[in-house]
Amino acid sequence: MKPQTLLFALGLVLCASVFGKKPYYPDPKSFPAETAVLTYAPKVPPAIKRKVPARVKIDLETKEITARLADGVEYNFWTFGGTVPGPMMRVRVGDFVEFNLHNHPSSKMPHNIDLHAVIGQGGGAEGSMTVPGHSSKFSFRALNPGLYIYHCATAPVGMHIANGMYGLIYVEPEKGLPPVDKEFYVVQSDFYTAGAFGAKGLQPFSMDKALKEQPDYVVFNGSVGALTGDKALKADVGEKVRIFFGVGGPNIASNFHVIGEIFDRVFTEGGTKVAQENVQTTVVPPGGSAIIEFKIDIPSTYILVDHAIFRTFNKGALGMLKVDGEKDPMIYTGKQSDTVYLPEGSTIQTMPASGAPAKKAARGMSERMSAGNAVYVQNCAACHQPDGKGLKNAFPPLAGSDFLMADKKRAIRVVLEGLAGKIEVNGSDYDGVMPALSLDDEDIANVLTYVRNSWGNKGDEVSASEVGGLRKK
Ligand code: HEC
Ligand SMILES: [Cu+2]
């Protein structure tokens, strides 16, 4: 044999041993066994401390429930674990996961699970198809680290996802992530209801709107207000925050932004690289995710939004991160002055009329209250807040407002004509501008009846003719 031929043959053997060999996956029988910690949003399972792969057992139950989608609005959710999103799971790359899916006997539908972290038929869907009152088991090796969506993939798939069946599983890389002070689990998704946003009662799923991709609701963590008020995320000045963010869809990508913050680092698309630093808004598609990190410098209420902004102020995609701590005027001063600016010829602006078709007049107090609630949600809540408590120094409260309750005619004029100039409400001064809203007499009568009889307020009915009598001809 010529020396060249010998070298060539040797090369072949070497190549085969390096590239051709199947990678070696140790038998998980020798692994330590443990049960995964599952957490409900916005909680995140603890970081994994062990340095070796384990045999991890996960039990997850599918359950169909009726629950709150917004105030006064109920929905028949199909869920993992009884919540939307389903619980978050955390394993480590190389782990061998035994997955048990239990479908509650009260379910009407079969369900399964497609974990994007799984390499295998349907991401586990085929191995986990489970009829009501049954359990299925399949096992997988977590080959790729990253943050993955899981969802139900039972036909009609769109409907199972639209009804709430999704969540996140994080597969930690070998070295884990650098420690932070607070970790949060947030999932955005869209809902399609027979009634419009805010329409009361149990709302059935609208296949028509889902097909047109026109959601009535776009929300964080399964309902309007899941991350506001008492349920706001909390952190302190100086802390580092990490958000495990996913989009369940079914249809709508998120333009995720936190008002008043900048993302220091983003693992875009839920992958293992910090693909970008100093990010304002990150796009996350349905069935996708991102890991977002930032340090908090000053106290504030930071607002989590989908920056396709009508989704935030009109469809529910609004969350809060409340941060306490010491102010730092070297970073942000807060408002330093506020003076009236009224250039010549300026008046209160008028919002355009909606052009909605004429509607039936409400008969009686209870019809007025429910019609008024709908007007309130669409026209007033963005400023005066869903709970009527307003926002300090900006929007006066309607709940318990002495200004509102003292003078019915004045209240009608406020909504008819707008309001500017200094007023006092419950002992606090406000000097803002409320726009005239172009509502008709009926809507104004309904909304004022509603605000004068909600949140502890007690007043009489406001009629459309009372409003008409005060309308300037
Ligand atoms: C764009 C924000 C905005 C919207 C929308 C809005 N308001 Fe106001 N509203 C204000 C501001 C600001 C004031 C205080 C104005 C001032 O300081 O002179 C105010 C004042 C009031 C007051 C008198 C003060 C009080 O607290 O009692 C009433 C009553 C009121 N609004 C009712 C409504 C109703 C009802 C709607 C919906 C039909 C509505 N507002 C929509 C911003 C808004
Ligand atoms: Cu399902």
Image (cartoon, rainbow, N blue to C red):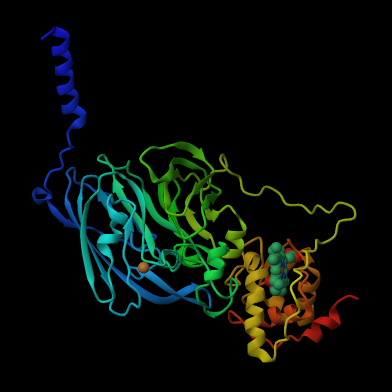
Please tell me whether residue 194 is drawn above or below residue 277 in the rendered image. below
Placement of the C terminus among the 4 image quadrants: bottom right
Task: Provide residue 181's location: percent of width, then percent of height.
Answer: 36, 48
Please tell me whether residue 106 is drawn above or below residue 419 in the rendered image. below
> 338 or 419: nearer the eye?
419
Q: Is residue 421 visible?
A: yes
Task: Provide residue 65's location: percent of width, then percent of height.
Answer: 39, 76
Q: Residue furthest bottom?
A: 364
Q: Residue furthest left?
A: 30
- Residue 176 placement, left or right of 412: left
Task: Provide residue 221's location: percent of width, then percent of height.
Answer: 44, 62
Q: Quadrant of ligand 1?
A: bottom right
- Residue 135 placement, left or right of 314: left
Where residue 451 sits, quadrant-wise, is bottom right
Q: Is residue 429 visible?
A: no
Give the residue displayed 63% in from the left and 89% down from the top.
366
> 435 or 298: nearer the eye?
435
Placement of the N terminus among the 4 image quadrants: top left
Please tell me whether residue 360 is drawn above or below residue 207 in the rendered image. below
